[in-house]
Image (spheres, rainbow, N blue to C red):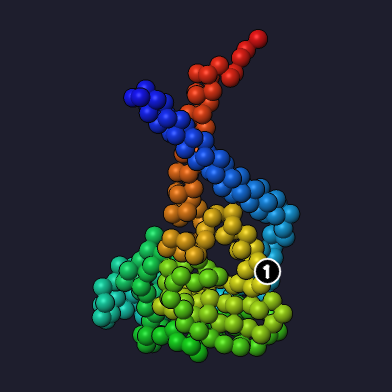
Amino acid sequence: MKHVNKHKSKLFKLSTVKSLHKWLSLLVFIQLFIWLGTGLFFNLMDHNKARGNHNKQAIVIQKIDNQRLLSANSIITSSSKPVSDVVLVQRLGQPYYLLAHDKGLYSHFKSNYSLVDAYSGIALVIDKSIASKLAQASYKGTGDISGVVKLEPPIADMLKEKNTVWQVNFLDDLETSVYVDASSGRLVGHSNEDKRFVDFFFMLHFMDYPFLGEGSVGGFNNGQITFFALLTLIFCLTGFIWVIELLRKGRYKFS
């Protein structure tokens, strides 16, 4: 009786392994099919359209009068916040000192900046009006501004961006949106319907599904990929166990 129960238990375990392997094979096949399909799409798509820069133009840099510039040290000294770095930049053709109070490793990392007029020493706040002017300076299309919204991350069009931004929407055929960093005035980028269409395929390819886990991150570094890798590992292990069992039963014979 004990031998019979042991045999039934073994059969049950092998049956579970087979069932798990079959269901996992379906999940792995579906995702591999998605990878193949999206990979083919990336090879055939128009890469210029995918960037969303159809209505983007280079911002004109104006000549700076060095004689009128205030010293960077005086600006740092008068700042009410600790300053870790200072850079001379231009915004709307005027020179400003960009003071970094909390600077991320990359521009899209969480940071905290302030802008001070390099001629007068007056602080510049990137409000709705300034953000609109900065967006228009980078826009070469014919559409008018249809709306300006301040957004906190995550930003659907710019998933890697971790800073608060102004979204300036233009009324054109491509529904162009321009994104401006709310503290530094940095042009984050342009987006439009072409880019959003491509982003959908990137979401599928990276398994970067916003309805799972913590939401989209704009790349492979997400929990869904880790979970799928574990499922694939289990799929391989169950297949290996099944093969060992078939070998033990003599199902594989070599002539």
User: In this figure, which residue is indicated by the disc labeled 1?
Assistant: 194
Question: On the image, which quarter does residue 57 sit in?
Answer: bottom right
**In terms of depth relative to the viewer, which is nearer, 219 or 35?**
35
144 over 35 or under it: above or below: below
For the C terminus, the quadrant is top right
254 over 229 or under it: above or below: above
Q: Position of residue 43 (x, y in %)?
A: 70, 51
Question: On the image, which quarter does residue 190 sit in?
Answer: bottom right
Q: Position of residue 184 (x, y in %)?
A: 43, 76
Q: SS class of the residue under badge 1? A: helix
Residue at figure coordinates x 42%, y 30% from the top left? 8
Q: Is residue 100 left or right of residue 49?
A: left
**In terms of depth relative to the viewer, which is nearer, 189 or 35?**
35
79 over 103 or under it: above or below: below
Residue at figure coordinates x 59%, y 82% from the top left? 169
Q: Position of residue 27 (x, y in %)?
A: 56, 47
**In terms of depth relative to the viewer, which is nearer, 4 or 73?**
4
Can residue 68 be seen here?
A: no
Residue at figure coordinates x 59%, y 54% from the top left? 205
